[in-house]
Image (cartoon, rainbow, N blue to C red):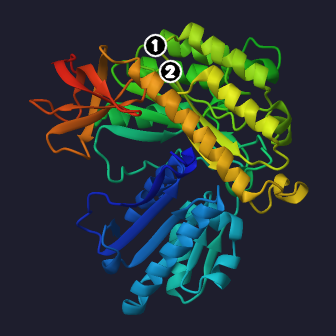
Amino acid sequence: MEKTTDEKRQGESLIIEPNENNSKKLFIESYGCAMNFSDSEIVASILSKEGFNTTQHLEEADLVLVNTCSIRDKAEQTVRKRLEKYNAVKRINPKMKVGVLGCMAERLKSKFLEEEKIVDLVVGPDAYKDLPNLLSEVEAGRDAINVVLSKDETYGDISPVRLNTNGITALVSITRGCDNMCTFCVVPFTRGRERSRDPQSIIEEINDLATKGYKEITLLGQNVDSFLWYGGGLKKDFVNASDMQKATAVNFSKLLSLCAEAHPKMRIRFSTSNPQDMSLEVIKTMAKYDNICNHIHLPVQSGSNRILKAMNRLHTREEYFTLIDNIRSIIPDCVISQDMITGFPTETEEDHQDTLSLMEYVKYNFGYMFTYSERPGTLAERKLDDDVPESTKKRRLSEVIELQLKHSEFRTKQYLGKTVEVLVERQSKKSNLHWSGRTQQNIVAVFPKENHKIGDFVNVKVTDCTKATLIGNAIDIVQQK
């Protein structure tokens, strides 16, 4: 549990169905947040048209790409270790080309070509459409780099392939970038300014997924609640452009409604929210539609008002409590999860106790917790001394994790004896006789396979649990959705 939402998926090699006309092989490995995995699907789609099929065998690849994360130093060190592995393979297969994608590429830019001698191309998150040109540069024997950030690019015109898919769940990107400028975070520097995708292209992508049999989608962005689209048919009877824009704007609440109404039998999730931007309107929209899942990932980072201010988190502890109270009131069975940082510069024991007391108030179902990691270029790195000893950071993190485990167990036990609806996603990791899936509240549940199959919605009576998993027996199959 000692990890962030930005690190909970590590190093998955991705593969799609081969195109028999393609002769080259692409090995693409992704680290970090869900947005990186979504971006890798965009990259695979672009390169498929350039003659590449994906492979899970590094040794046979013509092109190796690693999609990187910069949220913590540990994430970057993991990527550098992978590059060492690529280098060993490249000594055997010198024709193999290696590229670095994503946030780490954007942060380090041309330094990557100097520091990692095996890297042939460096491509930032907004430059994936330029990959064909960059590969031509590499083939001509030149280093290739494009890390230019865009104010407009959303890749809404590219139909992503689905990598290593179970054919049941999919990610749908709705925003890119972030404008919040939290002092500890590199995202605004590596992914650029916030911009929203045309809602029509979002609905079209979801329509395509529904046609292909997908049962659940996750609307994805660094900060989904700030989604805002000013396009659409303008009404002639408005006095000025400002009035027209307001009348035709689609905010996140409206987008949720559009998605839920377009496919009432498809589960809708979203991630990630920022407390300062989540509105009552969004919470009420979630309550209105049965197919919008009752789970909100709501990073708070600290329970101390002083530290929140130093982080440039534009909400207070008290405002966060009010938001939690509204969620609990309007959606009583909503699961809430968190991100938490321990050891931010100047954090005192009193600040730490404020974090623990906030956790006691909310009693999150689960969370992603980590020690503060100074990131180059951020305001915290430039203006604040990383003055909390590492031993203190780790001790505080241990206390936060211990408390979260206690709360996770408390929340999970509340489901004992209850019946939950589970979407079957895969075989259980611990038993080939059991299915694994998630409830509407994003809690993992396992149960005997019997005659059920992947993609079924199954009613499961909960008979036992761990701190994070529900265990039970199927009582029937819900009407197929």
Q: How crowded is mark 2: few (under 14 residues within 10 Å), some or many (20 or more)?
A: some
Q: Residue at (68%, 31%) from the top-left corner?
A: 356
Q: Is residue 444 above or below residue 189?
A: above
Q: Residue at (38%, 51%) from the top-left corner?
A: 161
The single residue placed furthest to the left in the displayed view is 451
Q: Residue at (36%, 53%) from the top-left corner?
A: 163
Q: Mark 1 = which residue?
A: 289
x and y, in percent, of residue 101 in the image? 56, 65
Q: Is residue 389 above or below residue 63?
A: above
Give the label on residue 241, or none.
Answer: none
Q: Mark 2 = which residue?
A: 258
Q: How far apart are marks 1 and 2 (CA)?
A: 11 Å
Q: How crowded is mark 1: few (under 14 residues within 10 Å), some or many (20 or more)?
A: some
Tag 1: residue type? Tyr
What kind of element bears circle 1?
loop
Q: Is residue 440 above or below residue 182?
A: above
Could you say which quadrant of the image residue 225 lies in? top right
